[in-house]
Amino acid sequence: MSPSLAERSEAQGREWRDPQAVVAQWSDAGVADDALLRMKASRGWWDALAEAGVTLIVSREYEHLVLAISPGLQPRVSYIRLPHPSGIAFDAAREKLYVASTRNPNQIFEFGRVCGALDRRDVTRGAEPSVGRLVPLRSWYLPGCSYVHDLAMIDGRLHANAVGQNTVVELGADGARTVWWPSSVEKNGAPMTDRNYIQLNSIAAGADLSSSFFSASGERPGRYRPGHPAYPVDRRGVIYSGATREPVVRGLTRPHSARLHRGRVWVDDSGYGEFGVTADGRFEPMTRLPGWTRGLAFAGDLAFVGTSRVIPRFKQYAPGLDVDRSRCAIHAVDVSTGAVRGSLEFPYGNQIFAIEAVPAGWTTGFPFRSGGRAHAARALFYAYST
């Protein structure tokens, strides 16, 4: 028996009441698996994070989660759900956080802090403080073939890897402007943007494009494309110079998360589960970790390095890993010694993509927590002020 008009109307009135669904424009966003949020901290982890004085913003792409991990007497892990989140960038000057979502079409989400609540007579203040929470301020769309990966602030402007187009783009609310590409993908003075040829996937951001560096899985287009089972990866990865558009480091295997820190280029050599620094055209591993290394952020002498499980259909891309022992975790690594100060493991986690460190006092994290009260989030989104 089909529902009556009144029943249909009542059902429609219940839809889109969950703030998470509205934020992500995804009707099932509020259905989060609590197991994905379970974590196990090793000895030393929370001390290392507190010493660093940062909150970590972490994207877990295949689980559609963005986490905020904050230190303190009572450490806090909060989250928001977005479709396949990847790159993250913090604009410290404007106090904005950006997260890329790489489903088709791609989206860029801009977050800011809640500063208080609007003066409303129909709102009862809750016991849980909302000041400092991160809420979305706006989002904009890009074509799915952009295949946005890393995000970075360069010269005060937001940039991204358009992996599907072999370029680096400058992003704005009106779209993307191509600003850089390797010489190997240039034809007749312009980049080849018709397909992904080299998996140009991360940005070590300098003061400008010329002083930045970019990682890729391959140096030039070949017979097979990234994503093909036969695509060659072992020691084929490179780091390009922004100034010359030529490789300055070779011999990497599916490198990710290139970063500039204290004048040196650091990178995750994902296919071997390594984290290290580059020097004299070579990669020098500092430590080997249990999983596909991806995600990297620095705070003083500490590097926060992500590890992921290997997706079974891509195990050929990890020739240096014990795939069955790979873990989804974040590791605090002392960059002066290579020692792991502590790790935070997600036993039911899968993939970490990006890690960004923001000052611990800047935010209290995202509006949602495992076991949190739904009405508190609804009240926050009803009358927040930024």
Image (cartoon, rainbow, N blue to C red):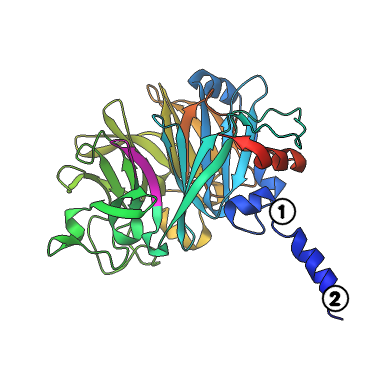
Q: Which residues are magenta?
A: 149-158
Q: From this viewpoint, is residue 41 visible? A: no
Quick one: SS at disc 2? loop
Tell me: 300 left or right of 177: right
Indicate whether 2 appears above or below 270.
Answer: below
**Residue on which disc 1 sits:** 17
Question: Residue 104: where, in percent of width, then height?
Answer: 47, 63
Based on the picture, tell me whether residue 51 belongs to the magenta stretch.
no
Residue pushed farthest left?
188
Residue type, mark 2 in image: Ser
Name the image quarter holding the C terminus: top right
Query: Mark number for residue 4?
Result: 2
Disc 2/disc 1 C-alpha distance (Å): 22 Å
How far across and how far down the image is residue 309, in percent? 53, 49
Categorize mark 1 by other alpha carbons within 10 Å: few (<14), some (14-19), many (20+). Answer: few
Q: Is residue 6 left or right of residue 217?
A: right
**Which residue shows up at 40% across the image and 63% down it?**
143
The spot of residue 235 in percent (x, y) is: 29, 51
266 to the left or right of 298: left
Label 1 sits on what residue type?
Arg
Q: Residues within 10 Å of mark 2 (few under 14, many from 20)?
A: few
Q: Earlier in the sequence, mark 2 or mark 1?
A: 2
**Can residue 169 be seen at all in this image of the molecule?**
yes
Q: Position of residue 3 (x, y in %)?
A: 84, 75
Element on which disc 1 rests: loop
The answer to which of 267 and 67 lies nearer the viewer is: 67
**Relative depth, front residue between 335 and 375:** 375
Residue 156 part of the magenta-drawn span: yes
